[in-house]
């Protein structure tokens, strides 16, 4: 059986099923850097041009990005389970990092304003939500919260030069004011 597996690795058509650099030190160090100070989420995508677009334009989502972006921590078993469940959605792993300070501040502001049914990520957009997709508004998380992406098959890491997990745009407070008036 081992000989068979070694032979199938040589055939490039099947090699992607056997190469996985997700648990390599470089990958985990990039993914979990400063994890005590951050809320870290991962999202998988198939095409590299989609990963580049998310890096430059921000992450689009409906209602809450928790539908497709998974929260992660240093718990290796949790990481492995989440990775194995989602890796078939694509080999490009988008890393979203938002400082705990920003998350806590905007969660508190939503609560103080009495705004329900919205989450901190709905506030962290610099553009107004767009029309409906699958019965929900489409939000675009500011690109500053995108740390970069990883090709988990090769281990290649692409960093976002504009990444800032503490990014705080004046548009975020305006978003709260807009929601108050709805």
Image (tube, helix red, strand yellow):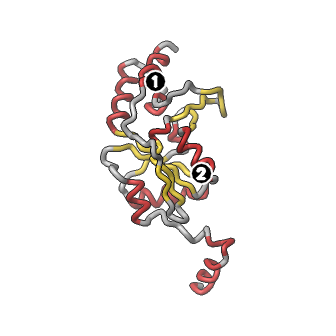
Name the residue located 36 percent from the left edge and 37 percent from the top edge: 166
Residue at the disc numbered 1 = 171
Query: Horizontal and vertical percent for residue 177?
Result: 45, 16
Q: Can you tell which of label 2 and label 1 is closer to the viewer?
A: 1
How many marks the image carries: the answer is 2
Label 2: which secondary element? strand
Name the residue located 51 percent from the left edge and 61 percent from the top edge: 156
Query: Horizontal and vertical percent for residue 182?
Result: 52, 14
Note whether 143 is above or below 20 in the view shown: above
Q: How far, Cα to Cα, is label 2 from label 1? A: 28 Å
Query: Horizontal and vertical percent for residue 99?
Result: 36, 39
From the viewer's perspective, is 49 left or right of 163? right
Name the residue located 66 percent from the left edge and 73 percent from the top edge: 12
Note whether 176 is above or below 104 in the view shown: above
In the current view of this chain or complex, which residue is farthest to the right?
A: 13
The numbered dot on residue 45 is 2
Label 1: which secondary element? helix
In the current view of this chain or complex, which residue is farthest to the top?
A: 181
Query: Horizontal and vertical percent for residue 28?
Result: 41, 59
């Amino acid at each position: 059986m081992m000989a068979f597996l070694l032979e199938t690795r040589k055939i490039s058509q099947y090699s992607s099923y056997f190469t996985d650099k997700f648990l390599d030190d470089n990958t985990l160090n990039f993914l979990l850097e400063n994890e005590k100070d951050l809320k870290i989420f991962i999202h998988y995508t198939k095409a590299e041009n989609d990963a580049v677009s998310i890096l430059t334009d921000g992450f689009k989502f409906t209602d809450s990005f928790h539908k497709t972006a998974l929260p992660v921590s240093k718990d290796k078993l949790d990481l492995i389970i989440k990775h194995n469940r989602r890796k078939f959605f694509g080999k490009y792993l988008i890393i979203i990092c938002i400082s705990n300070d920003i998350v806590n501040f905007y969660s508190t502001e939503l609560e103080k304003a009495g705004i329900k049914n919205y989450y901190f990520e709905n506030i962290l957009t610099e553009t107004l939500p767009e029309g409906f997709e699958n019965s929900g508004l489409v939000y675009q998380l500011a690109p500053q919260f995108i740390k970069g992406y990883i090709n988990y098959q090769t281990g290649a890491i692409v960093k976002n030069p504009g990444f800032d997990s503490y990014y705080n745009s004046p548009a975020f407070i305006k978003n709260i004011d807009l929601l108050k008036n709805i």
